[in-house]
Image (cartoon, rainbow, N blue to C red):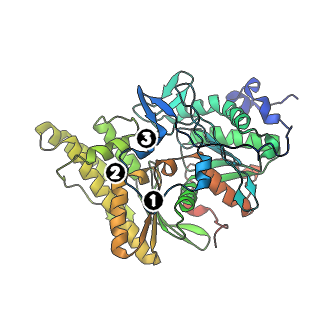
Amino acid sequence: MSLQLSPYLQSDFPADCLPSALLQKNHQPGACASRTFESRTTTCGCQGHLWTLQEYFSVDRVHRPNLGPLPTLQESVIYWAQISAKEMHLLLLAWLTLGSHCHWPCFWHMEACTTIWRHLCSLGICHPVGSAVFGPGSLLGLYEGFLPGDTARHHRAVILDLLQEALTEAGLTSEDIDCIAYTKGPGMGAPLVSVAVVARTVAQLWNKPLLGVNHCIGHIEMGRLITGATNPTVLYVSGGNTQVIAYSEHRYRIFGETIDIAVGNCLDRFARVLKISNDPSPGYNIEQMAKRGKKLVELPYTVKGMDVSFSGILSFIEDVAQRMLATGECTPEDLCFSLQETVFAMLVEITERAMAHCGSQEALIVGGVGCNVRLQEMMETMCQERGARLFATDERFCIDNGAMIAQAGWEMFQAGHRTPLSESGITQRYRTDEVEVTWRD
């Protein structure tokens, strides 16, 4: 069978690189149900360091009593394939999801049997530590983050092979797939487009419904699933977003947000000022340095009603760093400590105000910055004083991943959502409150 690609597609994906598995129609009934997968730990290489995934996920982290041990279902999901400099990590869950969050493409396949997930499996190709994108013999954005163009080129180079490998490893064909979900936005335009093109193409080739998923809602739904939170006030904090959210009348309503840059972006940019390593991530390294800080440097505290501002704080601390480090008045650790305490206090304040307004007794932290133990401690203190309960997760679920798009997409699919081809583009500023949440009461 020959396949003709449009000039636009051909410019990004040469016809001869489209795997034959995309057109595979042979399916052996019951072949999937007999497969079993085990949890195991493997190692990944990063800048000469060897980490086990188990070690990384437990490095200097506090116990979260509300999260508890992973349920058996989730344990069955996490089958870690070998990761090396030439093999990246890809998770595959029970239907097919294409995620393009910043610096990795991911696939998840999820199969439902009545109301439960029958089995889940995974293979490897997105670096879980998040410090770099590994390609065949190449490393992207090791110290200074990820450039959209480089990231998009990486995605285009590997995504079709990954799709074929994922299906082969899972023992599935296109007949087993219920629908195609992809990240519609928000995010960096070039990587989003790269994955959206593949999602549209595969959906048409396989004649499957398409679902464009909001990245932010992916975080929220994954957080609710993993922690068991029912109707929490959500603090969504990441490198690109800072929002306080609560559910009302089939929408995730934004009660407060940043009016300029996101808190994660503020931390990342300050890490560049101090030349802090990006291994495993700038935010994590700031967190560790902050634990050794002893002096609180006064910084601007910018809360405007329910909104926050971080750009002025960043400019101020950049100037302070030049002056005070040169004179020995403080250490880099003191500055990391001061920045964390200030910006996290602002986030706790607006979250508490939203909880008071909504009468909420639950708070949920999602997004990459939600991994920060100090932020979780401050939020926990606030919740205890209010008689409320904090829900938080760790790196496995806070950091961008394909599973969260699969989970949100699954909820949308069951609720009858479909994305017409004419609306299947990407939206870099796809607002959380634009999505009608029909899968919740």
| Front residue of this view, candidates 70 and 318 | 70
Kind of residue sitting beneath label 2: Ser
Kind of residue sitting beneath label 1: Ala
Residue depicted at 34% across the width and 68% down the height = 382
| Front residue of this view, candidates 5 and 48 | 48
Find residue 369 and report its horizontal and vertical position in percent.
41, 51
396 horizontally vs 120: left or right: left
Residue depicted at 79% across the width and 29% down the height = 20
Q: Is label 3 in a helix, a strand or a loop?
A: helix
* Residue position for label 2: 311
Front label number (1 vs 2)? 1
> What separation in Å lies between label 1 and label 3 (alpha carbons)?
18 Å
Find residue 311 and report its horizontal and vertical position in percent.
34, 51
Q: Which is nearer the N-term, disc 1 or disc 3? A: 3
Q: Look at the image and tell me in which quarter the N terminus lies.
A: top right
Q: Residue lying farthest right?
A: 1
> What separation in Å lies between label 1 and label 2 (alpha carbons)?
27 Å
Q: Which is nearer the N-term, disc 3 or disc 2? A: 3
Find residue 72 and report its horizontal and vertical position in percent.
60, 54
* Residue position for label 1: 392
Q: Which is nearer the N-term, disc 1 or disc 2? A: 2
Residues under numbered marks 1 and 2 in contact, where contact means CB atoms less than 8 Å apart: no
Kind of residue sitting beneath label 3: Tyr
Whether residue 431 can be seen here:
no
180 w.r.t. 251: above or below: above
70 w.r.t. 40: above or below: below
Residue depicted at 52% across the width and 41% down the height = 102
* Dot label at residue 56: 3
Q: Is label 1 in a helix, a strand or a loop?
A: loop
